[in-house]
Structures are given as C-alpha cells and as structure tokens.
Amino acid sequence: MKSARTILLLSETLTFMLMMFLILFILYFMQMHIKSGYINMQKQDISKVDIIIKSFIDKKHSTFNKIIKPDGARRAAGFMEGFSDLYYLDGNLEVTSVLKKSAGSTIFRGYDFSTSKPAIFFRTVKSAEPVNSGIIISSESESPGLYLAAKAGSGLIVARVDIEQLKDTLKWFGEFSSNILLLATSDGYVLSKTSDMINLQILPEGDFAEIDLDEKYMMSKGRSEAVECDIAVFTPLSSVYSLVDSTMIYYPLFILIIFTVLFLRTFFVMKFFIKPVESFISILTGWIPGSCIMPVKGFLYRIKEISILFDTFKDKSEQIASGINELKVKEKEMQGMKNYLKSIIDSMPSIIISTDHDCLITEWNSAAERFTGVSAEKAEGKNLFNVFPELEIVEWSFNETRRTGRACEVKKSFNINGIVTDMNIYIFPHSASGDEGIVVRLDDITLFEKAESSLRQAQKMEVIGTLAGGLAHDFNNILAGIQGSVSILKLKTDGNDDLNKLRPVYEKYFGYLEQSAERSADIIARLLTLSRKHESVHLKVDLNEVLNIVEGICRSSFDKSVEILVKPFGMEALVRGDSTQLEQALLNLCVNGAHSMTIMREDNEHKGGTLSITMGRTYPDQYFLKTHPESSAEYEYWSISVRDTGVGMTREVLAGMYDPFFTTKGRKGGSGLGLTMVYNIIQQHGGFIDVYTEKGEGSEFIVYIPVLQGDSESAVSETAGAIRKGTGVILVIDDEEVIRKVSQELLSICGFNVITAEDGYSGVNLFRERAEEIKLVMLDVIMPGMSGLETYSELRAIKSDVKVLLTSGFRNEEKIQEGLEQGINGFIQKPFTMTRLSDAVFKIIGN
Amino acid sequence: MINKQSIIIILTAVILLSPGCSCGKKTKIALMTKLESGSVVGVSEVNSAKMFLEEKGVENIEIVPFDDAWEPEKTVKAYEEIKKSGINIIITSHTSSCAVAISEAVNRDRVLMLVTGATTDILSDKDDFILRNVHDVRQEQKLIAQYMKSRGFSSLLIVRDIENAAYTEPALHYFSRYYNGKKIKTIDINISQFNAEALEKRVRGVSFDGLYILIGGHKAAAGSVAQLIRTIRPFVPVIYTPWMKTPAIVETAGASICDSIFPSIYPERALHSNVDSYLRRYRERYKEPPTFISLNVYSAMQILKEAIDAGHNDPGSIKSFILREGTIQTDFGPVMFNRYGDTESPLYFITDIRQEFR
C-alpha cells in the first residue's frame, strides 16, 4: 500500500512524462505532416521536371525533324544550335560526314562508333522518324548526353544533345527554391545536378540523404521515361522542419512551464493536503485514547475539510476521553462490585464454581479452594473435571444442563481423603457476555442429611410409636392365638400316643401356629424396615406392592373405626425409587388421614371415617402443566390419592403443613415431621403433592410420581417355591439353640443330614474335619466371638468353593451385603418357613 | 521518499535528455578522386573501396569520398574540406598534377597520403607522409622504353598530352633516356581540346612504324587519337601508358584496339586468379567493368587496414608500421615499400585488352 505522497509524486512524474511524450508526439506529428506536404511538393516538382524534360525532348525532336527534312532547312545553323554534335553514320556506324561538332570533340570523319555505348542505340534506329536515346555517358565525349537519330538512306543522321542543355532548362529549379534537382541513371549514377555545392556520385537510398556535411536532405525520386533517367529532388530538412525547428527553441520552455506547473501543483497539494493529512495521522497515532491533550498545528487549518475533520476528531476525542473516564469510574465501581460479589461468594459456605461453555473454570471461590485444596489461580482456566475429578459423577447432569439450559439438582457423596461428604449439587446455566457457561453450587449436606435421616428416623419412630399401640394389640392377638393353640395341643396330646388320632388336631392347631408366626414375622419385617436407618436406593419399584404393604400395615394397626378402601392400579405401576421411603411416605399420609378421623376429632364428635387410597395414571395436558409447575411435559405420572373424611385443614394449617415440627395434634401426638418427610421423599422421587382440603369435610393428598422410563433394576424380591428334598450334609452355625434345632429339624425333613455348631470356632473345626462331605453351611451373621463373616473367611480358607447360606433376623444389614460381595452364595431372613428354607438351600446347591 | 523522488527525476531526465549513443569509433579515410557527374573514373575507385569494406567485413574503417574533378585547384579545395572534417588519412586516385598541388600541405599537416594514381617523380625519394603503391614515372617509363626497344621499332611516333605535363614531361624525359637514342618523333596535343583535323595533318607528314600515345589521366580520347592515326597508318602498333587501361578505351579506340598494347601493373587476368576474381565480382555487382586504377585503391585499402588493425590509427604510426613492415601482402600480390614509401614492381604488357574488360 503506497502513501498519498508517493502516489502524488508518481502521478506527477507520470503526468510530466506523458506531457513530454505528448509534446514529442505533437512534434513528430507536425514533422510527419510537414514532411508529407513537402513530399507532395517534391513529387509535384518531379512531375514538372518530367514535363519540362518531355517538352525539351519534344522541342529537340521538332528541331531535328526540321534538320532531317530534305528541303535543306537542316543546314540552317539556327537549328543546329540546339545540338552539340551532328553527323552522319554509314551502315557500319562510321562517321561519314560531320555537320557539327563541339569544341574538343573527338569525333572525326571515319570515327568508328561500333564499339561505343551509343552504338547500341544506333542499331535500334530503323526508320526516318527521329527517335531519341536515354542519357548516355559516352567515352568519346566523357559527359552525359542524349542522341537523336533517324534513318538517312543506308545510314543514320545523328544529333547529340549535351546534358548541359537540359541542365540549363532546369536551371530555374534551383533559383526559386532551395531544392536540389538530380538526374541519375537507372543505376543511380548522378548525371546532373542543379547545385555544385553538393558532392554526390550515386543517388542515395531511402528518403533522407546527407549529401553535404552541413545538411541533411529529404529526397523524393521519380522517373523520366523520355530520357530514361531518374529524377531526384532534394529538399534540405532545415527547410522542411524550419517551422518545427522554430518551435523547437520553445521546447525547453514548454518543458520548463510544464515542470513548473506540475511542481507548483505538487507543492500546493503537499502543503495543503498531504502535509496536513500526515500531521493528522501522526497526531492520531500518537493520541492516547482518553487523553484530551492534542498538539494543534497551524497547517491543519489550511483546508476547510481537514480543519473540520481535525476539529471533529478533537471533539470526538474529548467525548471519548470523557466516556473513557466515565468508563473507568464504572469499571472501578464494577471492580468494587466484583470484589464485593467475590467477597460474598468467597464468604459463602457453598462451593461455587463457574465454567464457560468449554468447561473451563472461570470462578473458583474460597470454599472450593478449601474443599479441594486447589487454589483459584491454579484452577481458573483449567477443565473443571480435571481440577475436581469427583464431579465426573455428575458430568451427565452437567452436560444435560448445558444442552437443555435447565437447572438440575443432584445429591452425591464424595469420598475425599477418606472423608465421606454428602453434597447437594446444584447445576444451573448462566450466560455471561454471550458465553453460555455453567455454575455449579455444592453444599455440604452431610449434617443436613444426617439431620434429615435423623428426622426421618424420628418420624419413623413417631410413626412406629403411632403404630405401636395398634401393633401391640395385634401382637397380643397373635400371641393369644399362639398361646391358645399351644395350650390346646398340650391338652390334646397329653396321655395320647395315637398319632393317627392326633393328626387332625396337629394339623389344625399347628396351622394356627404357622399363621400366627407368619403374621408376626410380617409385622416385624415391616417394623424393621421402618425402624432402621435406610440409605436411599432408587430401583424399579411397583407402586402396587408399596400400596399393598402399606395397606397391610394400616389394616393391622389403625383403629377399627377407620374404614380402609384401597383401589390399586390394574397393572404394573413402575417408578424409579426407594420402596422403603415410598412406603414410609404413603404410610405417613395414611396415618395422618386416620388421625384426622380419630384423635383429631373433638371429644363430642363421632370417631372414625373412611380412608380411601386410589392409584391412577395422569397424562399431563397444558392445563395440568400450568397448574402444576413442578410437572414436566416429558413425563407421565402415577397418582396415589389418600383421602380421608376427617377434620380437614384451615388455610393457615395448609400453608404450614410441610414445615418441620409443625403439628396440629398437640399433646395427642405428632412430632410435626411427618408431612415434611413425605414432601422430601416425594420430591426426591421427582414428584409433587397436591392437597385438597376443607375444614370439617376432610382432606385429599394426591402424590404424583413420574412413570418409570427405561429399565431399572428391580427391587430384590423373594419368590416362594415348593419344598424340595435332597441329600448330603449341611452344617448349621448359629449361636441360638432354637434356631439350630428348628433348622436341623426342617432340613432333616428335607432329607439332609444336619450337623450344628454353636459358634464360629467350633463351626470351623467341624468344617475342617468334614469339608468334603459338607454340601452347604448355614451361617448366622451376628454371633459373639467370631462373627459370621469372619467364620466365612475361615471356611473359605479351608475350602475355596464352600457354599454358604447366610441367615439373619435383619434383611438389609450391611454385613449381609458385605458377605454377598465376598462370595456368600445366598441369604435368608429369620424366621423362615420350611418352604423358604428349602427354596433358598436348593437355590444354592440345587444344580 | 527523497531517494524515490531523485530516482524518478533522474530517470526522466535521462530518458528525455540523453543523447543517442554514439557508434563505435571508426577510422575515417578520405578517398580523393574524380566524382563529377558522368565520370566513369572515380566511380570505380569509390565502388572498389566499398566492395573492399563489405567483402572483408571491415567495421572500423569508413571511406569518405571527396571530389577534386582531377583538377589541381579543386584538389586543393577538396583537401581543405578533408582537413575541416578532421580526417588525416587520404587515398588519392588522381593525376600527378593534383598530387603535387597538395603535397606540401599534406606534409605540413602530417596527413598520411597513399597515392594510387600519380607517378610524378617529384614525390619520389622523399621521407615524407606520401606513400605510393604504384611506380613512379621513372620506373614506369624505363620499363616501357625497354619494351619498346625489344619491339625494334625503326621510327617511333609519340603523341604526348601536354595538358598533363606534370606526368608527360618527366615521362618523355625518362622514356627518351632509357629508349637510348633510337629515332623518336613527338607530337604534342592538348587532349582536352582535341582537334582531329590538325592532328591528322601533322601525322600524315611523319613516317613511323610504332605509336606511343603518352597520355595520362584516363583520357578515353586517347582511343580517338589511335583511331585517327590508324586511318593514316593502319595496323601500326599502338602502345599506351598504363593509365589508359580503362574500359572506355575499348569504346573509343575502334579497330585500333586490335593493335593496341597496354602496360599494366597487374598481369593479364587469365594469369592471376585474384585479379580475375576481382574483375568478375566487380562486374557482377556493378554491371560494368572497373578501371584498373580501382585495383590500386583496393590494394591501398588493404595496406591501411593492416596498419589500423595493428592498432595504428594516426598518420605517423601508420607510416612507421608500413615502412617497418616493408612488404605488405595484398590480394593482388605483395607491395614492397622502400624506405621512402615508394614501390617497385614489374610491368606487364597486355595486347588483348578486350579480354581484360569482358
């Protein structure tokens, strides 16, 4: 890219050169034009000369005619004046008579022309009509001349005309012009010239000739056929170009004028345009944005436009400076705000991390530093999952939020340096300066979880406590049944050894005993489930089963004045969730409903009512979505409605019902945690709760839980099979004698040879002795001394493929899980029926 | 920026104002001869010089013809023009009177003059700037006299042209000396003002059996003299001077050409291939035969070229080179210079002159 100055200089130089070329062209054109004119004039001269020569020849012919006439006129001296020589030749071309000869002529009577140049012409003369030769340079005269001849008898009469006569005729040519006339032979040898000033032997070639030292001539050639010679006209170039030459002296002046004009133009453009622009540019390049200080140079005001431009620039720069100052102030404020926000963010106990669209960390607060041990300087700019690899477990959620732009919340546990921390991870999108990034907030909810777990546990305890009264009644009934049956059996079998007669009695009352035991076991299982601490495990759960379990508990524990109506869903109602928590939540709602119809009524009111539990499926429409903002069009929902005809709730109660420790039960019971738990549980399952209530009429709680999409692991379920029989030795290790004896009895009925041990040590010793023949070991988890799992380790050391069936009164003990992971083949919960026992045994050894 | 400006301005100035480049330097040689219109002589010499330059591919020599019309006054003027043009090397092809007219000026101005046509002994035996590649008159006439003696004429008629006295007077002197007392009759004429009747009358009164036409300067009119005398004395042998060996003589001599004898510096062309070749090349190119004096000019060009090619281009060094070399080889044979710059060589007598000009 060239500067204006360079372009200006180049353009001016080019203009100058073009002007020079133009001048040269004009001069050349003038020369050519003039030359053309002169050439035409020369050609005209040649034509004139030719005419003159022809006229001259004609005159000579005319005179010669008169001479050769036989009337004697030929002898008139006047006629012979026109000729230098006049003689007769015989047939041999010898001179027979000399009528006239010039002084010094070598012609004499008897002179032989036969070998001379004119002889060629003489031999062509055939008639008495005169003919003329071209110009001949004959040796005898040594000067050019032309011959006229005519037949005279057997010979010829010949007249010679010296070229000097022709020259005399053409003398006028040089008198009236500066042109020079040359006559030349066809070979170019000059015969005659009208100027003795030039020294030319041979006619030059071309249009120009330097025929003397001081002058160049322009030449035109023509031909005279009359005398067979070339006519050349030379015009001195000084005449041709005199006009041009006269202007040539002004050429330097033209150049000077053009140069001066261009120079002045260049000067003024430089002064009034280029220089101001360059100065402006230098001011601009040296200008510091924000600075109002600007050097003002006078020449910037030479031209209006540049002056306006400069003034405008000055004004704008002032505005910019003011804007920049303002911006700086704002920046300072923003920085202050940023610092303030950073302080707030850093002061927050939550870990707050923000990333850009590419997962590169942009913000890393103090809590993040403390938690990860990575400083903000090291973290910023790095990939989030490289710096905080523990977050990879939520990478899917992270990507989903980035993709959908919707926030999500997950709970995860981190084990960092052996310390397990429960974190609530909230991932939400943000858009900063057009860059879509992500903000991750991690809150340590370990204590909260513990608290919640405690709360749930407390709530469970409360529920259990609530249920305890009802359950105590049930248990008393069950025990009564058991005791009664035992008493009857003792009575009936006393003193009677006839088994056949006793069989119906045994069948009847042992049946009662079995039913009571099963019922008790069922109730205890439910209680255990509710009572123990439970880690949430989200698996595929059929809500019908949940409903079934809750129904069972309700029926067995609620006041009989409460009528329970259950309407399950006609087919599988699968959700992804924790069956235990769901049971707890549903049970809680049922308990509340029962309370609202019993203990919540006034003393003078009729106790009791109807508790309806209905399950359905909801397909959200636009109205539903609108009225249930927690819902999503992506899901369908199972609905479980728990409806009572109790006291209902006021607006105030409705508003605070989910608040922890909010209760309306006063002294009658209620920690105020129930609905809080229900709310939390349902929320954790991605669901929500609708409440309809009317004071004095009752309430309806509708729980919505998303329909399961995709596969999920099914909850462990036990299936019952028929009693099977087998052979072999089974070792039972249990510290309870009753369990050992019952197990031995049951397994013997199944066909096995059973040996027992009362603790881990003796069990190991026994196994060591009979390892090859023992098919299966039934092992209690909880034993004093060597625990069940320790015993298993010893057994495996003896025989690596030992088959073990673990037993315990608790279903989901950690140790059971641990044992299963270590390789224990199966588990059965106590108490167990023979069917369940045989099924469990053959499940392990069956194949 | 300033450099660019300067360069642009300088370039422009150079383009506009720079003069045309000058050609390579050539040594200019003047050729002084008769160039008047219609003259055969002179044309031959100029053509011969041009032919030499072209055939030999000479690029460092330029021939500049000057006309002196073979008139001493014009010779002097022509010399002045030569001097004015800055040329200081001259080849002359003119009469002895012309050569004598400028000899003093040539030596004064230290201009080198190579004489190809003047035989005057005034120029002989002098250490000057005048060199000659032809005989002087003494040498020439001695050889002619010896030939004449060998012919055994009892009575010899000499017709002498007194117009060219510078040549014919010493020529007759030397001829008479070397012819050694045999009977000689001399008739003087002015060939430029030839009067056939007067001559006829004078010749009729003389008894002779041999005719020596002592005319120099390419006077074709000598042929007319021979023709005229032949009408009085047919078949008389006519001996010319070497300067009459021109094609024009064949035209003017008529039947007397059959009895004519021409002394010549070069042998018959039939006996010298280079001469024959030169004559043929010239005729092919210029459509007419050359004068024999043109061979002298061709030979002189060759001598000067050798000196110039040896690095000598001023008269003094060229003269020194030539005299130092002594013998210079030319196409037509060696030219031997004595210490005065004169040459000696044999003379040939050609009887069939028409063959020489075919």
Image (cartoon, coloured by chain):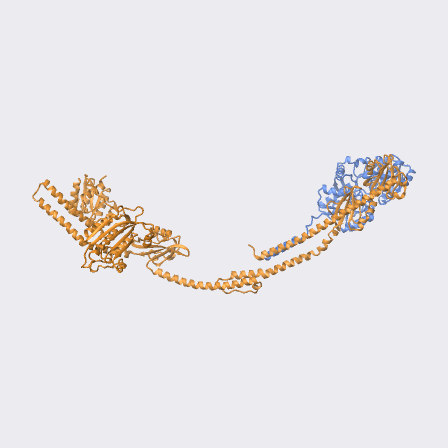
- Give whichever of A12, A814 is nearer the camera: A12
Taking the spot 29% from the left edge, 46% from the top edge, the residue there is A712
Residue B154 seen in the current view: no
Q: Is any part of residue B10 visible from this angle?
A: yes
Q: Nearer the viewer, residue A329 or B51?
A: A329
Query: Front-most of B228 and A376?
Result: A376
Splitting the image into 4 quarters, where does residue A298 fall? bottom right
Q: Which chain is orange?
A: A
Considering depth in this image, is A440 or A733 the residue closer to the camera?
A440
Left or right placement of residue A384 versus residue B41 in this view:
left
Q: How many marks?
A: 0
Q: Residue furthest front?
A: A697
Taking A733 as reference, is A12 above or below it? below
The image shows residue A716 at horizontal and vertical percentages of 25, 46
Indicate the quadrant where residue B337 lies: top right
Q: Establish if A112 lies above or below A824.
A: above
Q: Position of residue A397 (x, y in %)?
A: 34, 51
Colour that chain B carries in the picture: blue
User: Percent position (x, y) of residue A340?
Assistant: 37, 62
Which residue of the protein is positioned furthest toward the left in this rendering?
A495
Q: Which image quarter: residue B47?
A: top right
Q: Going by the image, does A223 lie left or right of A445?
A: right
Considering the image in quadrants, where does the N terminus of chain B appear? bottom right
- The quadrant of the rendering that contains the C terminus of chain B is top right
Compared to residue A152, the image places residue A242 above or below, namely below
Tell me: A596 left or right of A123: left
Give how far across and how far down residue B108 sits, in percent.
Answer: 79, 51
